[in-house]
Image (cartoon, rainbow, N blue to C red):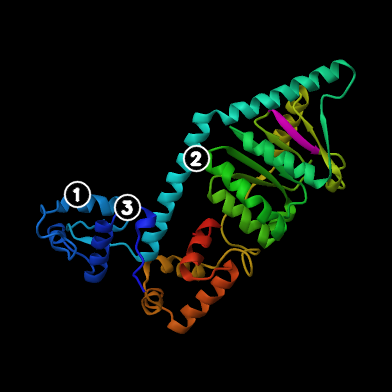
Amino acid sequence: MAQPDLEFLGVAPEDEELYRFLLRTGGAEPGELSGTPEDDPTGPAPDPGEACRRITGLGLAVEGTNGVLRPVPPAKAVERLVELRVKERREELEGAVGSTGIVDSLLAEREAGALSGAALAERGGAPIQHLEGLDEVRAAIDELTFFTRTESLTTYPRGTLSPQGIANSRAMDLRILRRGIRMRTLMGSGALDDPTTLAYLRELAAKGAEIRVSHQPLERVIICDRAAALTPIDPANTAKGAILTREAGLVAALVSLFERMWDTAQELPVGADGPDAGDGLPTEIERKILKSLYAADKDESGARDLGISVRTYRKHVAALMQRLDATNRFQAALLARERGWL
């Protein structure tokens, strides 16, 4: 069976060979890199300094104060390569979006709809849109968040989020945060007593979201760019549908309501307390074990670094993989980072 390579992650064969050489030797001085096995003896001598810059830039190696180049642990190195490829692809797609003008085209469609709504209002119709049922509401939320450019304001009066609700929201929430949009979320006090909800809120906070918890009654509202707002038709039964408005006066009033609720709420508690157990956030030892999955190549070395037995170490790793629904240890480390556990 052929040996897998790193070319699909953007690593040139000669750079991969340097990295594998460092893994085999544990480290090398820059001058030693000119003698790696794959060098062509008939060609020009490679520049060790350039080779060092390439593999350190890729995150495959680090240079110590004594000039010795040491390999980054494989799991951490591959994670870094994946991040670089994802970033490149995202920038490529976002550049394509900007050059094609697709967003402006879609905005023009929305503006045309707004004009139609104004004309309807002049004839006695309502300048707001009634959305019937959850499907229409979810479609509207997807559309609003896609076009959001600066700010997203959301309240959750109940304060608790179901695992399915979190699964449905995660991709949209992370997309908003990746784009640098300010996200402010108000939660009901029930969030403090629900480990699943707390874990997700802390995950979002770790990625830049601003989250507060209110002990006062909240009104359900979603506001995007202070230009469009969603409120439930029936606050007691949000499944009935919602009202979508872009009317400036109504949106301004809802923004003012949100700000008043925000001012009386408290910051999301930081750290582990009562709810931080069981299926919630990991314990301190579990965090250390997750970090060791990057740095330790073997269970024995990971257990030794943490001062615990190999059996205990493996027991924790197995439990964490099950909680994260990971198929291997590398995936467990990635999923833990995505959740804000590291």
Per the rendered image, the range of residues in magenta is 227-231
Please tell me whether residue 298 belongs to the stretch shown in magenta: no
- In the picture of the structure, the residue carrying the numbered disc 3 is 58
Q: Earlier in the sequence, mark 3 or mark 1?
A: 1
SS assignment at label 3: loop
Image quarter of residue 92: top left
Measuring from the top left, give residue 11's x and y in whole percent. Answer: 32, 55
Q: Residue at x 43, y 52 (%)?
A: 83
Q: Is residue 38 left or right of residue 260?
A: left
Nearest the eye: 299 or 74: 74
**Kind of residue at disc 3:** Leu
Q: Is residue 39 left or right of residue 169?
A: left
**Kind of residue at disc 1:** Glu
Do the residues bearing badges 2 and 1 touch, measured as CB atoms within 8 Å?
no
Question: Is residue 157 placed above or below 140 in the rendered structure?
Answer: below
- In the picture of the structure, the residue carrying the numbered disc 1 is 50
SS assignment at label 1: helix
